[in-house]
Amino acid sequence: IDDIKMRYRRLSALCHPDKNLADGNRARCAFEAIKTAYQQLNDPKLRDRTILVIEGARQRALRAYDALKLKNPLVEPPDLDKHIMKTFAENEMRRRDVEEHKRAHAARERAQEEERKKVEQEDKLFEEQWNADQRRNTRMDFWQQFQEDESRAGNQKRIRSAKNFKQQQKVDHKPKYGQVDLQSWRREWK
């Protein structure tokens, strides 16, 4: 940890925006990057994760070198720092992709929510217009006139009091060809 603190002080002194007045924006970005890296390395969990990433990158680079060495023994050993930086860059690109996907998903959900609210508002407006008092009274008047129609009411009474109405009785069906009717003796016995 003392080594990390010492390196942070050296790098921050080199990149501090007050010392690099010629290129202030670039110095400010570099200083912020160094500051966030220092804060991450001070956190034990993040430091352990960073160490795992570094060790994984080294192991992958050495395995790739061993595989190439078997094919061509004249291959030079890899630059481990380059592979480690490449791994951190790939991780950062993946993180940014995930953030972009999350932003796009959130925007899509907001658009769907706005569309749903718009449809609900349109439905509510339609219901309010449909249930307006004047229209409701008109519909109710039509229904009341339909119920009070004397000619229709007379027809209904005549239909209900029809004397020639006979209820149909259930007709027993003959069994299909090849089927045996096992219940026929009951009907004949009664």
Image: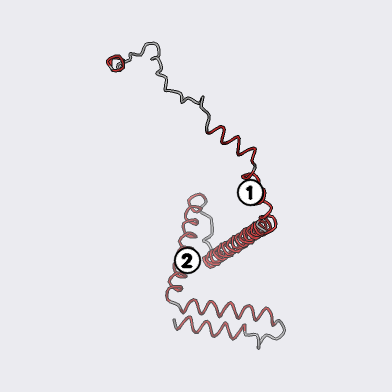
Q: Is residue 166 above or below residue 35?
A: above
Q: Position of residue 93 (x, y in %)?
A: 58, 63
Q: Is residue 10 above or below residue 48?
A: below
The three-letter amino acid code for the residue at tag 1 is Gln
Residue drawn at x 42%, y 19% as measured from the top left: 171
Q: Position of residue 107 (x, y in %)?
A: 62, 62
The residue tagged 2 is 53
Say which mark, if any, is on residue 144: 1
Q: Nearer the viewer, residue 15 or 190?
A: 190
* SS type, badge 2: helix
Q: Position of residue 70 (x, y in %)?
A: 48, 51
Badge 1 crowding class, 10 Å Cα cut-off, few under 14, some 14 to 19, many 20 or more, is: few
Residue drawn at x 57%, y 79% as measured from the top left: 34
Mark 1 vs mark 2: in front: 1
Badge 2 crowding class, 10 Å Cα cut-off, few under 14, some 14 to 19, many 20 or more, is: some
Q: Nearer the viewer, residue 113 or 132?
A: 132
The quarter of the rendered structure image containing the N terminus is: bottom left
| Among numbered discs 1 and 2, the one appearing first in the sequence | 2
Residue at the extreme top:
177
Residue drawn at x 56%, y 32% as measured from the top left: 159
Q: Nearer the viewer, residue 158 or 113?
A: 158
Q: Is residue 181 above or below residue 129?
A: above
Q: Nearer the viewer, residue 154 or 187?
A: 154
Q: Quadrant of residue 186?
A: top left
Say which mark, if any, is on residue 32: none
The quarter of the rendered structure image containing the C terminus is: top left
The three-letter amino acid code for the residue at tag 2 is Val
